């Protein structure tokens, strides 16, 4: 059992049996890749306006798509009764409906598949004794988080089916994205802790704290990006570095609605401005972190993280200037999760990994 003081909870050190450690790591890496794909597909679903095409939530039988003309007529009739169809897509053909339906169905199907991989792997490792104690509980907790994420996804869709709505509520979209990020962080952290990315080394508490600060910064920026997506703020002020000719928009544009707090989630001007400020702060923190670690064994990894943050910032600017074409929006969202993964891996590897028990 690993009793190193830098291990994150020595009670978990013996929670992984050596004989199944490789399979456990492969399972975690598979889930990480699946979540990356899921986030990208979710972005495509949003950018194609497909997210409200399925108006019912049937976790089990919903996996079966329409199989004949009668099934398609029923699904189309349900969508035609929705506010989005009446206010935005009136006159849509059945062929056009099928296009958006398949995007949403694929998104939900991938979510079901991830749930099955998560549940199947957990049960297999638990019943064979590969995972025990706190590791088993932590893995079970990740499963609960995934289930909660699915429920939040339906709450998000329901918000877009309310009278007068043509899209999901920005806050609920952001909540959906944030919980996906938390699940992703948990997977990457667990994989790193048990050696999926190589060995770690003990470092000063200050640098580890700064590394986790970067993780929180990336997570916050992803959440702000969710608000940008939900309020379609990326389709306004498509210039950089100025917004409508100013670095800081006037207050009468930043705060236009009442109550005052709603501007932070519904006002495209303030939402985009906050996302820009978040990007600048994250860039500065990543630069400082890389500079502070120069000449150390962690310098290369910190520089790589700074490079990823820089690439994401540049891609964000390009996406804005091009008025959010689908390819750029998807690349920007996918790269955000790659930055998050690298930041978590970097922070976790600043402590020795846990070695499996015999």
Image (cartoon, rainbow, N blue to C red):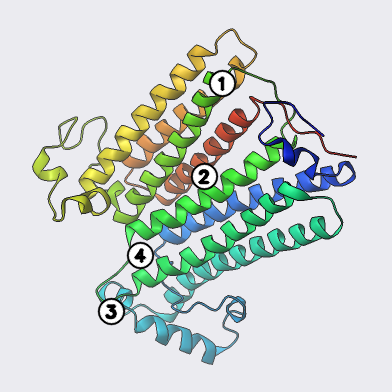
Specify few, some or many for label 2: CA neighbours under 10 Å numbering under 14, 14-19, or 20 or more. Answer: many
Quarter where residue 280 is shown: top left
Q: Residue furthest top?
A: 295
- Select label 2 or label 4 by which is in front: 4
Secondary structure of the residue carrying numbered label 4: loop
Mark 1 highlights which residue? Answer: 205
Residue 214 position (above or below residue 295): below
Mark 2 highlights which residue? Answer: 334
Q: CA distance from mark 1 to mark 2?
A: 30 Å
Q: Residue at x 90, y 40 (%)?
A: 358
Q: In the visual, does 328 lie left or right of 180?
A: left
Residue 101 is situated, as x and y percent measured from the top left of the image, at: 48, 73
Q: Earlier in the sequence, mark 2 or mark 4?
A: 4
Q: CA distance from mark 2 to mark 4?
A: 21 Å
Q: CA distance from mark 1 to mark 4?
A: 42 Å
Q: Earlier in the sequence, mark 1 or mark 4?
A: 4
Q: Earlier in the sequence, mark 2 or mark 3?
A: 3
Q: In the visual, does 162 lie left or right of 147?
A: left
């Amino acid at each position: 059992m690993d009793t190193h003081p830098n291990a994150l909870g020595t009670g978990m050190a013996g929670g992984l049996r050596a004989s199944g450690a490789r399979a456990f790591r492969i399972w975690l890496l598979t889930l990480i890749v699946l979540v990356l794909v899921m986030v990208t597909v979710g972005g495509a679903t949003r950018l194609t306006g497909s997210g409200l095409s399925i108006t019912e939530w049937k976790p089990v039988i919903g996996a079966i798509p329409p199989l004949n003309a009668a099934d398609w007529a029923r699904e189309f009739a349900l969508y035609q009764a929705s506010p989005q169809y009446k206010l935005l897509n009136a006159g849509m053909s059945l062929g056009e409906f099928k296009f958006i339906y398949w995007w949403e169905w694929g998104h939900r199907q991938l979510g079901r598949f991830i749930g099955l991989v998560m549940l199947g792997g957990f049960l297999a490792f638990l019943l064979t004794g590969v995972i025990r104690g706190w590791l088993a509980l932590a893995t079970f907790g990740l499963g609960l988080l995934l289930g909660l994420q699915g429920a939040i996804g339906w709450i998000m869709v329901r918000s877009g089916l309310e009278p007068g709505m043509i899209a999901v509520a920005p806050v609920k979209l952001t909540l959906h994205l944030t919980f996906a990020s938390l699940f992703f962080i948990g997977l990457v952290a667990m994989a790193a802790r048990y050696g999926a990315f190589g060995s770690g080394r003990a470092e000063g508490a200050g640098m580890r704290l700064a590394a986790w600060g970067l993780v929180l910064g990336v997570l916050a920026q992803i959440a702000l990006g969710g608000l940008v997506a939900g309020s379609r703020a990326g389709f306004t002020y498509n210039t950089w570095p100025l917004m409508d000719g100013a670095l800081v928009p006037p207050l009468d544009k930043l705060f236009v609605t009442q109550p005052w707090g709603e501007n932070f989630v519904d006002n495209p001007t303030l939402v985009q401005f906050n996302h820009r400020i978040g990007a600048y702060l994250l860039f500065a923190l990543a630069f400082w972190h890389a500079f502070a670690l120069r000449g150390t064994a962690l310098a290369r990894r910190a520089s790589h993280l700074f490079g990823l943050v820089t690439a994401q910032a540049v891609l964000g600017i390009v996406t804005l200037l091009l008025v959010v074409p689908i390819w750029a929006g998807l690349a920007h969202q996918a790269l955000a999760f790659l930055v998050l993964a690298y930041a978590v891996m970097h922070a976790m590897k600043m402590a020795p990994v846990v070695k499996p028990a015999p």
